[in-house]
Structures are given as C-alpha cells and as structure tokens.
Image (cartoon, coloured by chain):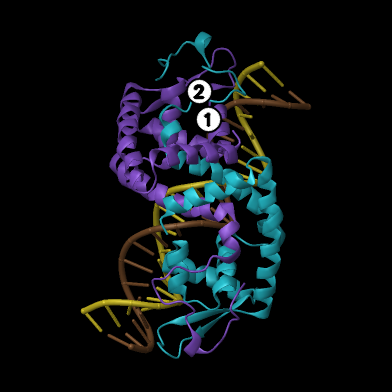
Chain colours: A purple, B cyan, C brown, D yellow
Amino acid sequence: MARPTSTLDELLPAVVDGDRLALGTLADVLGYHVAQASVTTVDMFERHIGERFGLRKVEFSILMLLQANGALTPKRLGQTLALTPPNLTLLLDRLQERGLLLRERSQVDRRSHNIVLTAAGLELAQQTAEAAQPMERELQSRLSSAERALLIELLRKVAGR
Amino acid sequence: MARPTSTLDELLPAVVDGDRLALGTLADVLGYHVAQASVTTVDMFERHIGERFGLRKVEFSILMLLQANGALTPKRLGQTLALTPPNLTLLLDRLQERGLLLRERSQVDRRSHNIVLTAAGLELAQQTAEAAQPMERELQSRLSSAERALLIELLRKVAGR
DNA sequence: TATTGTTATACTCTATAACTATA
DNA sequence: TATAGTTATAGAGTATAACAATA
C-alpha cells in the first residue's frame, strides 16, 4: 500500500503541498470519516450558535432536550448525552449560575432531581433552536436534502440509540 | 414542540427511565448525530486498537497516513488531521520517543522536516491496520456493507476534503 | 445494599502567544 | 517579511475515586 519511506529529499514530499494525502487503511475506517465530518459540524456550530450565545455543544444539547421533554433528571440527561455524573454536575452548575435552569429535588424520590428550564432558559432554547436552522441550511452546499436525511438515518444506526 | 415544564412531581419525569428522550430540534441537527455516532466509533477504536496498542486515535491516523504516503512534513499531517502545530509537535515527540518515527531535517528547505516511520513504526502500522479490519466488521451488526459505503461517501461530502 | 448526585482530583485534548531558524 | 516548527502556558473536556443522602 505504501511507497517505501525514504530519507532522500529528492523523492520528498511524496505529494506536493495542497494535494490530498492517500488515506490508505483510513479510507475504510468509519471512525476516521466521522471525526473528519465533525470538524465541519463543530466549526458550523461554533459560528452559528457557540460564539453567538456563549454555549458549548453539550450545553446546547441539554437545552434542546429539556425544551423537547420538559423536566428531566441528570441521570437521563447523562445517559442520552454519554456524560459521566461529575461532568454533568459541573455543566448543570454552569447553566444554573447563568439562570437558565433550576434543580428541584424530587418529592417522589428525594435522591433525584428534576432539572427545569427557567423562563430565560426556555427563551434561550427557542433562540438557539432558531439559529440551528440557518446552520443546517449551510450544509445544503455539500449535501442535498435527501442525502442529509439519509446521512442522519445511517448515523442513528451507528449510534444505536 | 415541548410539553410545558412543570414543578409538579406528579407529572415528572416526562418519560420513564429507559425510554428514549424526544430529540426535538436536535433530530435535525447533523452535528448531534455525528457526535452520537462518534461515541460508538470511539468506543470501538479503544477496544480494538487504542487499548491493545497504546495508541490514541490521532496517533493511529498519523501511522496510517505515513504508511500510505511515505514520509510527510508535519505541516501536511497537521492540515489533513486538523491539528495545530503545537499539538502535532507533542504528538510527534511521543511517537518518536517510542521509536516509531524519526524527524529528518529537509535538505531542500531546512525549516522543514520529513517524518519517517522507523522499522518498528512500519511494523506497528501494519499490525494496527490489520486490527482495523475486525473493528470495521463489528459494524456489520448495525450497518450493511452498502450502507457503510454510502455513509462514508456522505461523511466525506460533509468533511469536504 | 444499591442508587442519585456531588466533590476532589487528575489526565487528555486543544488553542493562543511568543520564540527560533530558516527562507 | 513570511514560513516551519517549537516552547510555554492555559483552558476545555473527560475520567476515576471517595463521599453524602436517600431508597
């Protein structure tokens, strides 16, 4: 698969600057392509939502899940977003300090909390949900609407949940 | 989209534990699905390659790119893998300390380096490339061969490079 | 005893700024 | 002046272990 490595400058670099590298085995490694695609999606998120609203990706996801489901326990948020409990505690601290959500101790099981969006949190959730639309439209230059739907369906199969 | 939030425990949680949460706006955010899929692919990488060979994802990618292209400059590796120069310097230090690669100063442009796999590096590249095959086969339970090929093609469009 | 969530801590990952050397 | 790479530093992200409160 590889051209043999060489110490001779006359033969190097193998490809001129600006060309794409041969991927070799990576061409068939799904995780590599997922990681490369995430460079694009993370950049888009930062430009459309992250910088504008001072939100990290996971914080945005938490707002969206609370908006869509109403109050949730940290446990369920953590399961859905693959966050460890200490990590989630710090994230919720941060959002609570910004006045976006509240922790209410459950009356049913007093070990558990219900995380509830405040009015400000609901407002920010609505604003960022709207900002997500032009973000997704920016993808239209790379992906048709049908391709985009198909891609999401395939990614959900990989995620398996 | 959301059931109104409530402080009344009798109505909470909105969904019982174990059910999937409503995604709301997230259902149409490609980046969310990319991130969720990466939970799966990262886990697979760790089990098949990361833990077994003591390699991080990016280190594996560096080995694969050097295997497929022969010697490369840090600049080209960084462009391909979206790594900042300081980040890459540390990664190359680590791989060099393990005896997997060498930095050779270019005779053509003495600012530049050629990164060359050692015999040990080439050997490890071959071993990990082989280990990637059962890793990809593990995906067959979630994705047909055709779906997998299509998914990779769509992810490449999103990555745009 | 098991579960929910927190605190304490550390390690990895990534970014920015300032620097060296070469061009 | 500009570019390739390094050093120094800090911040963000994520993990484990030990703990408190409750079931």
Q: In which quarter of the view is residue A158 placed? A: top right
Q: Position of residue B85 (x, y in %)?
A: 42, 69
* Chain where mark 1 sits: A
Q: Is the same chain shared between marks 2 and 1?
A: yes
Q: Nearer the viewer, residue D17 or B63?
A: B63
**Which residue is at 53% across, 79% downward?**
B71
| B6 left or right of D14 in image | left
Vertical placement of residue B45 versus A56, above or below: below
The picture places residue B24, in percent across and down from the top left corner, at 43, 26
**Which quadrant of the figure contains the C terminus of chain A?**
top right
Image quarter of the N terminus of chain A: bottom right
Answer whether residue B63 is visible to the viewer in this image.
yes
Location of residue B62 by image quarter = bottom right
In this view of the protein, can residue A54 be seen by the observer? no
Label placed on residue A72: 2
Residue at which label 1 appears: A77
Q: Chain of mark 2?
A: A
Q: CA distance from mark 2 to mark 1?
A: 7 Å
Position of A2 with respect to B24 (left or right) is right
Q: Position of residue A72 (x, y in %)?
A: 50, 23
Q: Nearer the viewer, residue B136 or B5?
A: B136
Identified at 68% across, 53% down, the residue is B135
Q: Secondary structure at mark 2?
A: loop
Q: Is residue C15 above or below residue B71?
A: above
Front residue of D23 and B149: B149
- Name, please, the residue furthest toward the top: B10
Say whether residue B104 is left or right of residue A127: right
**Amino acid type for the residue under numbered disc 1:** Leu
Amino acid type, label 2: Leu
Number of on-image labels: 2
Q: Residues within 10 Å of mark 2 (few under 14, many from 20)?
A: many
